[in-house]
Amino acid sequence: MESDDPPTHPIFRDAPPPETRLWRYLSFAKIIALFQTRCLHFTRIDQFDDHFEGAWPKSDLERFANLVGGQVIPKVTRAMRLGTAASCWLAADYESAAMWRLYAAGEEGVAISTTAAKLQALVSTVSQPYLGGVSRVRYIDHVNSSLVTELQHSPMNTLHPIMCKNVSYEHEKEVRALIVAWPHSGIEPPGCDFLMEPQDFIEQIVINPFCKPWFVDAVKGIVEHYGLAGKLQTSALARSNFYDAAR
């Protein structure tokens, strides 16, 4: 029996299992904005600092240059960077000390967790001409590898580079939710906001394990104000949770 579900777009073929735990590490200001607006922000691809975002590997550009009409492929991909926005998450069962240091600067910051199923449900509500979906990021060596070769047994699409990152970011274990607008209806910079209900979408709110006591009190006050106290917990990496009292 054939399924009534629409076919999966090629860039979303590597979706994580629904129960996959996802983490996002945020500054204190961004977590307040999340609670206040009840919106998840999606950054337009061309607004990321990483210049590899949405880029075809070097060898693929050379291959396209030698094909009749091949130059159109990277041109379309570059144009689609202006019509695609992403929300980036770390897939992991546990907190990451490295991500605390990288994305929750100083001794402040908060992490939230959700599941792949909830993120998928959120972006699946977009209507035409928009496309929404979730997939694991593919990590590639843009100088020495070929995306065309890696995907030779899969349907090719000009959006594939947007679901790729340089191999130097492999430690991020990223799962990316995308909102794609077709070329005639782009996305304004710096991106777009997607309405969600924090009480339903967020599973945990975790306080930076390296923070000072005053910051714990500040986060507790904000979380209680927005009715999310039941989601709050101290970090498993916090000294107060360390099992060896002698140290």
Image (cartoon, rainbow, N blue to C red):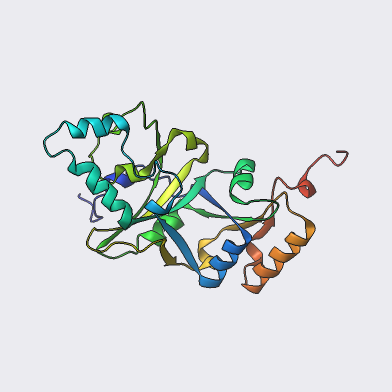
Image position of 12 with respect to 126: above or below? above
From this viewpoint, is residue 24 visible? yes
From where the camera sits, is residue 152 visible? no
Estimate the x, y position of residue 215 in percent, counting from the top left.
Answer: 73, 60
Identified at 48% across, 34% down, the residue is 168
> Quadrant of the rendered structure where residue 53 is?
top left
Left or right position of 43 against 82: right
In the drawing, does residue 192 fall left or right of residue 25? left
Look at the image and tell me in which quarter the C terminus lies.
top right
Residue 182: image x %, image y %? 24, 58
The image shows residue 77 at horizontal and vertical percentages of: 27, 47
- Picture mark count: 0
Relative to residue 63, is residue 82 depicted above or below? below
Residue at the farthest top position: 144
Image quadrant assignment for residue 83:
bottom left
Residue drawn 26% across and 55% down?
5
Looking at the image, which residue is at 44% across and 44% down?
A: 50
Residue plotted at (32% across, 42% down): 161
Q: Nearer the viewer, residue 55 or 86?
A: 55
Left or right? Give the position of 198 relative to 184.
Answer: right
Q: On the picture, is 66 further left or further right than 11? A: left
**Residue placed most toward the observer, 9 or 35:** 35
Of all residues, the one furthest to the left in this rendering is: 68
Quarter-wise, where is residue 225 in the image? Answer: bottom right
* Front in this rendered view, residue 167 or 245: 167
